[in-house]
Image (tube, rainbow, N blue to C red):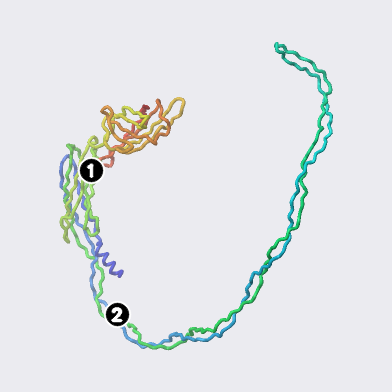
Amino acid sequence: MIRNLLLSLCLLFPVMTSAQVETQFTFSGQNAEVLKGEKKVTQVTQVPVEFPSTCTRQIPHEVRVCRDVTRYRQSCSTIPSSERCWNESDRVCRPVIRTRQECSSGPSRRVCQQQPTRRICTERPARQICQTRPDGRRVCTDVRPGEHCTEVGGGMACHDVPGERVCRSVTYTDQECDSVTRRRCETVPSRRECTDIPYSENVCGMETQYSSESYACTQTRMENRTSEKTIRSEVNVQILTNGLVEEFPMSVVVKETTPAMTAFAMEAKLLKEPQAFVVLKKKEVKIASATEKEIVLKGSLVLEVLEARMLPISFPTAIESAHIEAASQKLIVVMEGGVSSQGSVDLQITHNSLLTKLKTIAEAKAEYPSAKAELGQVENKAALSVDLKGLIQNEPQKKNMRMNIKLGSKLMLQGEIMNAKKPDTEKQYEGIFVELK
């Protein structure tokens, strides 16, 4: 099976030199060019070749064979009835008369005692007592030092004494439980039990066996077969010049995309970087005819030559004004000159004064036209409106707000630019004053 798979792979994927046809031309203002080229390729294919040989085959024949085989017979016996016993525990409870103490306190009573009086004396220093009379005069009197005594205490002192605690014995009924073990037995009836007992038995019978036999046969081996094939290509080049004349060389390559050369592709490249931009608008190649000796290819290539000013890229020459509408939180940027209908905006608004450090008011990135940014007009001038809702980081100020803004333009071309240096699709504007309205 593996040998057949290798054979199939060799037939499907022959070994060959590169089937690549390259042609060149120089553009100098012409509208069309026909590029013809050819290349001879060497193809090495492995083909099967038969040769005489000796093969071996298996011949079946019947032989009587005897061998020991393990078999089983059943042996049965009767087990007589028996008695099976075990211990079981039961919980047995009985009533018991018990006694407990119940206590209570009697009523409290109030006890009162007569307290004796006592005399407390203090020594007072000499002092002056002053008072203001109704007529406004202040009159002071000197008081001599002496002993001052007062009577303290006397009367009844009462407190509550708790009642006497009385206890009595009360009887009640409780339960006491114990585990009681008893023996339980049951009769197991007689039963019949059988087991398989192995034994050996010699068994004879006819079996098919094989012997080898040689015979003359034909086998296949792979041999290399070399052949030459010519690849001819004809590519019609159509050039949209737009009236431009500039000399630059180009290379057009047609090469196979499958090992069996059943499909081809085209590649075009600039051999020298021109000042103009070259746009590849279309390329295709098809097999016109194919034989064992020759493959004829027909191709089509469409190019366009453009100056930078012809590209669909437009940026304003300057930013005329910018302001934030406080009510709608929209930034309106008024521009001088044209602007691309589709593009992107990346901006940052900051505030700076002598008393405060630089603060970011808002940052925004958006594609236009979209819900966040769109183009319009203000006084017949192009204007870009950017919605700042949810993007304002600090409160907009009346003065000292500036903006850095980068505008991007989408290159709306039917095709791809072949130049190594691509056109600028972004432009930066810095230090734009922003007002708050």
Q: Nearer the viewer, mark 2 or mark 1?
A: 1
Q: Identify the residue at horizontal 33%, vertical 83% (top origin).
A: 211
Q: Out of 9 and 209, give the one closest to the viewer.
A: 209
Q: Out of 273 and 313, give the one closest to the viewer.
A: 313
Residue placed under numbered mark 1 in the picture:
414
Q: Which label sits on residue 2?
A: none
Q: How many marks?
A: 2
Q: Where 201 sits versus 409, above or below?
A: below
Across and down, in percent, residue 107 comes to 75, 46
Residue 425: tell me if it is visible: no
Kind of residue sitting beneath label 1? Gln
Across and down, in percent, residue 222 comes to 25, 68
SS assignment at label 2: strand
Question: Mark 2 packing: few (<14 Cα in 10 Å), some, or many (20+)?
Answer: few
Across and down, in percent, residue 154 comes to 82, 32
Residue 157: name its quadrant.
top right
Quadrant placement of the N terminus: bottom left
Across and down, in percent, residue 234 comes to 16, 51
Kind of residue sitting beneath label 2? Arg
Q: Out of 349 and 183, give the one closest to the viewer.
A: 183
Residue 14: name its quadrant.
bottom left
Question: Mark 1 packing: few (<14 Cα in 10 Å), some, or many (20+)?
Answer: few
Residue 212 is left or right of residue 199, and the answer is left
Residue 334 is left or right of residue 82, and the answer is left
Q: Where 411 sits versus 236, above or below?
A: above
Residue placed under numbered mark 2 in the picture:
57
Residue 193 is left or right of residue 131, and the answer is left
Residue 349: tell me if it is visible: yes
Q: Identify the residue at horizontal 16%, vertical 55% (top origin).
A: 288
Residue 34 is left or right of residue 422, and the answer is left
